[in-house]
Image (spheres, grey):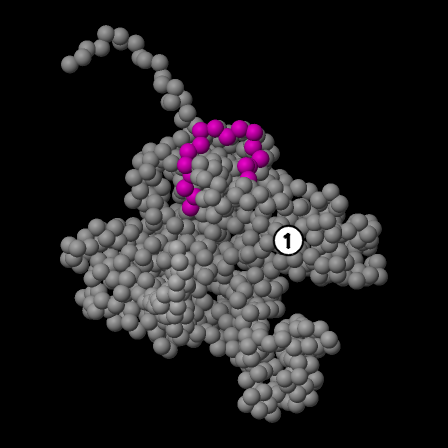
């Protein structure tokens, strides 16, 4: 055995000095030359009010540069299929490792995307059934609801040496149901919402939004096509006329000498409205689509999406549709019970994936659940599944509010997962607001002090104890705890729900009081959303603000999304006696150089596209002639550059006084978005800001009952207090507010609590408590009661 002669410690290895991620001079979005050092192989939590720059630093700077550098290692051909990423605006980025990003972006809302397809569990199940299922019906594609069956035969010409024609046949067995095309539901269009059949086309029979009688492309193409009698009431059409009117394939027709395409009304509606994402439609168009289109379960496959052949093949009396309909905790047990040595490695991999669902708190999900119906928190945890059993170390995991949508009972489980990832030698970066997760951090970076232009600087770096003692917004509010209210409001009535059975609900009977702040709670998957959205949303007078994402292009901004731009354009038009369309950067007033975008984009194929400020309008988006028109001494570009607070004052009095615009701006200020610029692209807003923008928009709708689905998502501890004030103002103005929520501060502030459980999936779906928060704390008979009691210090 060798003996050591030199007792002095050796000099550190050159590789060991790279134990920090160094960021110097970051200027992405609102960051103001941020310079920090983040320790590697530690759990670092980034805090700060919503809009302070956390996402800009963690996702748009550190993670984006790591991804860009990895993408550059591939060939130009492969890079052409990858997202193109620009180098972030930062002077130095050192010590980066491979970044695995687990964000809150909703999983694809494609109707054929399910939890099983998103996690690859479906792919493994298909292989399993194609190898072991009896009767054998074909390869894995025969069990795939995304693959249609195809048959073809005929002659093909083979050009090899002497050309010769060869007779060929082609067969591919797919598992897609032919009736619903793998969607599980079929849509019916309510014709009474499209036209009034007692009128003729000439009399204005169409009741579709935007279809004006003089429109060349819509109404006139039907009236003047020569295929229909424009003066004949629709109800008197012959069978052939009705077929042409509703279902005729695209046909070229001449209207006033212009060649146009005529197609049946149903086909046109499907192309114009139904092929688009519903969230991206304007509110009045979305309301029309919801009225006109009804979705029913496919009668042929009974919602399983699969063909009869795929459903006939079974393993132990279970077919693939039954397996996908089980909740994953039950499916994992079924897979473990299969004894098939020929597919042992496959069963092991599938079992590990399904066990990960249970471990991460998603054991209540079924593989056939459409991925578009998952909440942001559920979507994030589904993305985590593939990383849980990974043997990779020294990678950087980046999480965006991993506790979103989690009951306090589940947060501890999530914290353990984050610590496990760190203890395997990984760097874990977490953007988070919940004190329970901030408390487990090795290192904390607090950004602020405010939001938007008032943020973008590092206010604190250090430990939890240092944060508590520090004088930052997060430090001051870290130990804030809401107290139970002394006086509760008296209900003015009750909303009766009887025999609710949506999803996992077990015939729930509950009376939700009206005229008060009612909170519905329970562990994730206990049936809260099923109860409220299934039984209350859609009733007359109910305004439902769900967790659906706000989608918008870089041309969308808070002014266009909230409808604020309409009164502003009209005010400019009245003041200058011109058309309102001139004051829209997406219409007549757009700068011709950049088409109203303010910047000119150059597509560089597999490299990041370059955007340069338009030289013609200098980024103002409007023609020079439009900027000569003023309202209250400001042109339209100056008004759109104002913050909400500034614009509220501007339109509140004086020459620019505009009650309609002032009302919308007041709602934006109420939800804490006073710092936002009204012309700021929606793509630059954080998740919390988008949630509050949606809330402000819906607050303008007329309704007596408001349903809010987890409004604290993305909110800083300091902002929760402001949200509670807003909820109080809504109730005091005569509204009934029902909140689906996990945050203890909202529970403590409630007048009435409905608690579902006791567990998730088939272990939930029951009413376990209804009463006041004080009774829930005193009772402590449910998980929610225990955590609320601990929170209020009872």
Q: Nearer the viewer, residue 18 or 263?
A: 263
Callout 1 secondary element: loop
Corner quadrant of residue 170? bottom left
Q: Is residue 628 left or right of residue 214?
A: right
Q: Is residue 97 magenta?
A: yes
Q: Residue at x 34, y 58 (%)?
A: 116
Q: Nearer the viewer, residue 71 or 487?
A: 71
Q: Is residue 493 left or right of residue 384?
A: right
Q: Is residue 400 left or right of residue 623?
A: left
Q: Which residues are magenta?
A: 86-102
Residue 572 drawn at (x, y percent): 79, 58
Q: Residue at x 58, y 35 (%)?
A: 89
Residue 60 drawn at (x, y percent): 52, 41
Q: Which residue is mark 1?
A: 555
Give above or below for 213 relative to 570: below
Residue 694 drawn at (x, y percent): 57, 58
């Amino acid at each position: 055995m060798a003996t050591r002669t030199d007792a002095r410690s050796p000099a550190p290895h050159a590789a060991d000095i790279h134990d920090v991620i160094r960021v110097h001079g970051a200027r992405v979005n609102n960051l103001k030359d941020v310079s920090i050092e983040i320790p590697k192989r530690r759990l670092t939590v980034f805090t700060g009010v919503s809009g302070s720059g956390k996402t800009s630093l963690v996702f748009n700077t550190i993670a984006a540069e790591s991804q860009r550098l990895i993408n550059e290692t591939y060939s130009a051909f492969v890079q052409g299929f990858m997202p193109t990423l620009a180098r972030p605006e930062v002077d130095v980025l050192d010590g980066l490792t491979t970044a695995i990003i687990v964000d809150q972006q909703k999983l694809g809302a494609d109707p054929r995307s399910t939890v099983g397809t998103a996690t690859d569990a479906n792919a493994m199940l298909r292989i399993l059934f194609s190898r072991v299922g009896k009767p054998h019906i074909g390869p894995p594609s025969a069990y795939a609801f995304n693959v249609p069956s195809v048959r073809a035969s005929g002659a093909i010409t083979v050009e090899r040496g002497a050309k010769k024609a060869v007779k060929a046949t082609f067969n591919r067995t797919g598992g897609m149901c032919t009736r619903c095309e793998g969607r599980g539901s079929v849509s019916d269009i309510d014709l009474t919402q499209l036209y009034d059949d007692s009128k003729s086309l000439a009399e204005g029979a169409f009741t579709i939004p935007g279809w004006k009688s003089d429109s060349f492309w819509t109404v006139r193409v039907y009236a003047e096509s020569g295929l229909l009698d424009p003066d004949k009431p629709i109800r008197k059409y012959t069978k052939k006329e009705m077929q042409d009117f509703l279902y005729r394939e695209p046909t070229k027709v001449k209207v006033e000498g212009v060649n146009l395409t005529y197609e049946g009304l149903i086909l046109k509606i499907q192309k114009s409205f139904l092929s688009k994402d519903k969230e991206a439609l304007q509110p009045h168009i979305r309301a029309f689509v919801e009225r006109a289109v009804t979705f029913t379960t496919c009668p042929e496959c009974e919602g399983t999406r699969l063909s009869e052949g795929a459903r006939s093949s079974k393993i132990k009396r279970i077919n693939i549709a039954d397996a996908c309909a089980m909740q994953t905790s039950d499916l994992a047990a079924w897979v473990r019970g299969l004894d098939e040595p020929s597919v042992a490695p496959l069963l092991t991999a599938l079992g590990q994936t399904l066990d990960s669902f249970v471990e991460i708190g998603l054991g209540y999900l079924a593989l056939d659940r459409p991925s578009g119906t998952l909440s942001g928190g559920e979507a994030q945890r589904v993305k985590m599944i593939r990383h849980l059993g990974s043997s990779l170390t020294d990678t950087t995991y980046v999480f965006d509010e991993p506790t979103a949508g989690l009951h306090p009972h589940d947060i501890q489980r999530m914290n353990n997962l984050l610590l496990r990832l760190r203890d395997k030698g990984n760097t874990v970066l977490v953007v988070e607001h919940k004190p329970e997760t901030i408390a487990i951090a090795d290192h904390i970076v607090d950004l602020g002090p405010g939001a938007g232009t008032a943020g973008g600087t590092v206010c604190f770096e250090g430990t939890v104890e240092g944060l508590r003692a520090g004088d930052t917004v997060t430090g001051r509010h870290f130990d804030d705890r809401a107290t139970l209210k002394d006086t509760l409001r008296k209900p003015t009535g009750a909303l009766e729900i009887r025999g609710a059975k949506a999803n996992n609900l077990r015939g729930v009977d509950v009376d939700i009081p009206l005229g008060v702040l009612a909170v519905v709670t329970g562990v994730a998957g206990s049936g809260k959303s099923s109860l409220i959205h299934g039984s209350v949303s859609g009733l007359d007078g109910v305004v439902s603000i769900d967790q659906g994402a706000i989608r918008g292009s870089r041309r969308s901004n808070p002014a266009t999304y909230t409808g604020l731009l309409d009164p502003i354009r009209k005010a400019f038009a009245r003041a200058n006696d011109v058309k309102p369309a001139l004051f829209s950067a997406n219409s007549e007033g757009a700068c011709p150089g950049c088409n109203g975008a303010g910047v000119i984009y150059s597509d560089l194929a597999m490299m990041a596209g370059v955007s340069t400020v338009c030289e013609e309008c200098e980024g103002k988006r409007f023609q020079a002639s439009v900027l000569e028109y003023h309202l209250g001494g400001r042109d339209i570009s100056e008004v759109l550059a104002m913050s909400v607070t500034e614009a509220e004052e501007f339109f509140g009095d004086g020459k620019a006084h505009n009650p309609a615009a002032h009302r919308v701006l007041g709602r934006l200020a109420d939800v804490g978005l006073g710092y936002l610029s009204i012309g700021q692209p929606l793509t630059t807003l954080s998740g919390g800001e988008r949630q509050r923008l949606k809330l402000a928009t819906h607050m303008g709708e007329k309704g007596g009952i408001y349903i809010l689905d987890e409004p604290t998502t993305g909110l800083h501890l300091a902002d929760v207090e402001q949200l509670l004030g807003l909820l109080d103002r809504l109730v005091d103005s005569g509204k009934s507010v029902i909140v689906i929520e996990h945050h203890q501060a909202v529970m403590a502030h409630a007048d009435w609590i409905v608690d579902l459980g006791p567990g998730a999936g088939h272990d939930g779906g029951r009413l376990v408590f209804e009463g006041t928060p004080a009774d829930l704390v005193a009772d402590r008979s449910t998980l929610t009661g225990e955590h609320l009691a601990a929170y209020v210090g009872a």
